[in-house]
Image: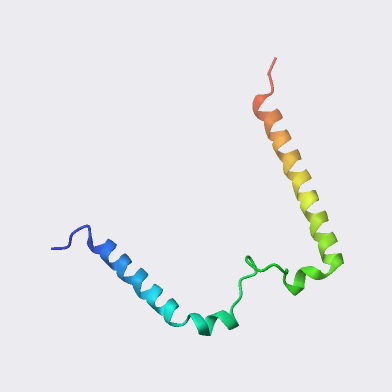
Amino acid sequence: MNSWFAPIRWLLFLALWRMSYETANVNRHSTIERSFLIERNPPEETRNPREKEWAEKAVTKYADAQEKKWQRWNEAMFERSD
């Protein structure tokens, strides 16, 4: 009796149930939770200039390490053996 529509119906039911819950509680959640992805001001953790400097240094070192890794990989894969 189970058709292949049964999982789709359950998924649709759960999605609509969640959507109705979120719309019913939109005012309660708007003051408590705030997404830092859509805020204009960054969170407090990133305002420390030393942390920003350390993060930039870590990013550049990581990028350099990845570049060296790919350069070694390219040399090992495409090196001509004479």
The quarter of the displayed image where residue 12 is located: bottom left
Q: Is residue 40 above or below residue 69?
A: below
Quarter of the rendering occupied by the N terminus = bottom left
Q: Indicate whether 2 appears above or below 77.
A: below
Q: Position of residue 62 (x, y in %)?
A: 76, 50
- Left or right of residue 53, residue 27 in this image: left
Q: Nearer the viewer, residue 82 or 7?
A: 7
User: In this rendering, would 54 be left or right of 5?
Assistant: right
Number of numbered discs overlaid on the protein picture: 0
Q: Is residue 22 above or below residue 52?
A: below
x, y percentage for residue 32?
A: 59, 83
Name the colouring of the figure.
rainbow
Extreme residue toward the bottom, this view: 28
29 horizontally vs 66: left or right? left
* Residue under the point 81% across and 56% down: 56
Q: Nearer the viewer, residue 21 or 61?
A: 21
Residue under the image location 69 percent in, 67 percent down: 40
Residue 37 or residue 49, whichever sits in front:
37
Is residue 72 shown left or right of residue 26?
Answer: right
Task: Relative to 3, say whether 31 is above or below.
Answer: below
Image coordinates for residue 76, horizontal then vertical, percent: 68, 29
Residue at position x 49%, y 80% in the image: 26
